[in-house]
Amino acid sequence: MEKKKFERPLITRIKAGVPDKYGMKSQIKPLTHIDNNLVADLIKEFGSPLYIISEKTIRNTYQSVLRAFTTRYPKVQMAWSYKTNYLNAVCNVYHQEGSWAEVVSGFEYQKAIANGVPGSNIIFNGPDKSDEDLTIAVENGSYIHLDHFDELHALIAITEKLKKKAKVAIRVNMDTGIYPQWDRFGFNYENGEAWSAINKIMTQPNLDLLGLHTHIGTYIMSPMPYSVATSKLAELAVKTFRKFNHYIKYIDMGGGFASKNTLKGAYLPGSDTCPSFDEYAEAISQALNNSDIQYDKMPTLILETGRALIDDAGYLLGTVLANKRLADGRRSMIIDIGINNLFTSFWYEHTIMPAQEQYTDMDDTTIYGPLCMNIDVIRSAVQFPVIEKGEHVVIPRIGAYNMTQWLQFITYRPKVVMIGMDGKPYIVRENENHETMNALDRVPEHLRKFTL
Ligand SMILES: *Cc1c(COP(=O)(O)O)cnc(C)c1O
């Protein structure tokens, strides 16, 4: 018989159902399977750590957002926010669902084109569009969302050179009642800058003003600001019609819906506090339907939802490297998932779950990543069962921003596997290795040799 490992005895007060200053204690349930694939099998086949994406969850979430809006407003177009997750396979699932591409750089623009998105279905946002980027976007008939007057002037010069019209919208920032107000992108509503930009564009023969855009922030935990923002854009559309007899074809409300992750310092879990898609949809649709825009000229509503669409579809799988006690006796666990793989751990208290059924009592635990860095903490104080070296953990809800903001640091970035609609795993991104990591390094001749 195998000798059992010694575990320090533990006395814990029963706290079931009683909230303390950290909120309600919640039992951690194991997560053994993802879309019917055993976590341990996935790690065995593809390595650890490992990113998993559920195609089924992506499609289901997409459909539920779309349904929430189309049941309230007739003309809705989604545009996938590339920076939230631009793995080609992920983007293509959205494009198959009918989503356009929303990009914020020349690099993302190229990715969308390479994925097969027609230029006329690309929305080009962001404060950094080079003359070269703008030229390509004009030639392809993409929607260029102007961020500032310098960009407006550059675009006018480019359209004159190309002798071609550009399809444009302006990004508008405004007071929607949320703090801090995002006023660094686009033209301000309250100080009249947005209206002034519209007036300038309307005098330009080469610019076709098709839309009004805003992206009021991210992880907006109330539907109210969307109602305010929609009304303000609708008012600009009405004003534009009254002065120029020109209809705005679309109103783009950007992204920003909260996902169910829990922000650091939040009292209650995000899954309890974040509004439903129906609540956001109600706020936006009602503001549009109540506006003075003429009934038969209602604009298309574009949504660039990122985080809330993809977060639930992503999982990060890892393995326990060691358990040890800290100086004060507290338990700590080292796993092979570092903050380089989990960039969002800077602002979320990520849920972490054991990946096997049987486990012991819960204990206050600090969970560290594998990096040789003091800040590599996945959870600083969490109730967690004792799981042994070699056993696995799963961090759910990591689909947004982690696979774009991940850092190559100390070690290679791992594989990403998508569980397809058929329940089978497909590699959608290979892991890095010595060869791929060194491919871009150059060593000048005089630094090639040394003797020690
Ligand atoms: C990042 C971004 C989005 C997506 O935002 P989420 O908060 O992830 O929904 C949409 N539009 C623009 C312009 C963005 O910069």
Image (tube, grey):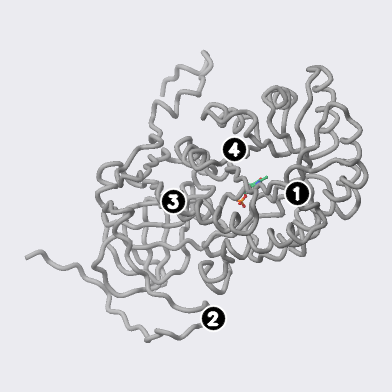
Identify the residue at horizontal 85%, vertical 36% (top origin): 149
Given this view, does label 2 or label 1 mark the residue nearer the observer?
A: 1
**Vertical relation: 112 (above or below) 325:** above
**Residue 249 x, y percent position in the rendering:** 75, 42
| Amino acid type of the residue tagged 4 in the rendering | Ala
Q: Residues within 10 Å of mark 3 (few under 14, many from 20)?
A: many
Residue receiving disc 1: 296
Assign a secondary structure to mark 1. helix
In the picture of the structure, the residue carrying the numbered disc 4 is: 101
**Nearer the N terminus, badge 4 or badge 2?**
2
- Determine the secondary structure under disc 3: strand
Q: Are marks 3 and 1 in contact (CB under 8 Å)?
A: no
Q: Tell which of 66 and 320 is nearer to you.
A: 66
Instruction: Kindly tell me whether mark 4's CB lies below 8 Å from ligand 1.
Output: no
Which residue position holds label 3?
A: 314
Q: Residue 56, position in %: x, y? A: 40, 50
* Amino acid at the residue labelled 1: Asp
Identify residue type, mark 2: Lys
**Residue 291 appears left or right of 137:** right
Q: Mark 4–mark 1 contact, CB under 8 Å?
A: no
Q: Residue at x 80, y 59 (%)?
A: 175
Q: Which residue is mark 2?
A: 21
Q: Residue at x 71, y 39 (%)?
A: 126
Relative depth, front residue between 80 and 286: 286
Q: Residue at x 60, y 43 (%)?
A: 79
